[in-house]
Image: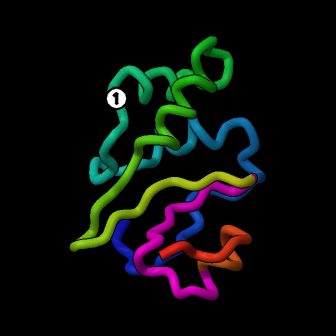
Amino acid sequence: MTAPNAIELYADYAHGLYIPQYFAESCSDQWRGITCDDRHILLHGPEHPLYWDAWCAVVDNAHVVVGEHTWRLWQDGDLWAVCDELMTRDEYEEFYGEERVA
């Protein structure tokens, strides 16, 4: 990930249940917080019995640092890379549907 935008679409909902597999196939080495086991499971696709458990762990822990800012994953149909620090108040409220607590 190289773009400085606060909100980046990573994969749209059209990937469906293959979003986790797509992420594992396409994520760069910049992403941290992903275990080798979880990535291996995701690469096997939704037929793997631990696929959704691995995906939950990845969504909860994956992050990428660019400069002094950190992006993490957010999934609500589409998969997003988001940096709360760079979001404007309006972006935050529109994206999450709630006010930012600062």
**Residue 69 spot, x, y in % from top left:** 30, 71
Dot 1, crowdedness within 10 Å: few (<14), some or many (≥20)? some
**Residue 49 spot, x, y in % from top left:** 63, 12
Q: Is residue 84 magenta?
A: yes
Residue 89 drawn above or below residue 21 = below
* Residue bearing the label numbered 1: 35
Residue found 36% across the figure and 36% down from its top: 34
Residue 85 drawn above or below residue 29 = below
**Residue 98 spot, x, y in % from top left:** 69, 71
| Colouring scheme applied when the structure was drawn | rainbow
As rendered, which of 98 and 83 lies closer to the eye?
98
Number of callouts in the render?
A: 1
Q: Secondary structure at mark 1?
A: loop
92 lies left or right of 94: left
As rendered, which of 9 and 44 lies closer to the eye?
9
65 lies left or right of 98: left
The quadrant the N terminus occupies is bottom left
Residue found 49% across the figure and 21% down from its top: 41
Can you name the residue that lies furthest to the top here?
49
27 lies left or right of 44: left
Residue 8 drawn above or below residue 28 = below
Name the image quarter holding residue 71: bottom left
Q: Is residue 83 magenta?
A: yes
**Residue 50 spot, x, y in % from top left:** 58, 16
Residue found 50% across the figure and 81% down from its top: 87
Residue found 57% across the figure and 23% down from its top: 53
Please state the extent of the stretch shown in magenta in the rendering. 77-91
| Amino acid at pointer 1 | Thr
Can you name the residue that lies furthest to the left here?
67
Residue 1 drawn above or below residue 48 = below
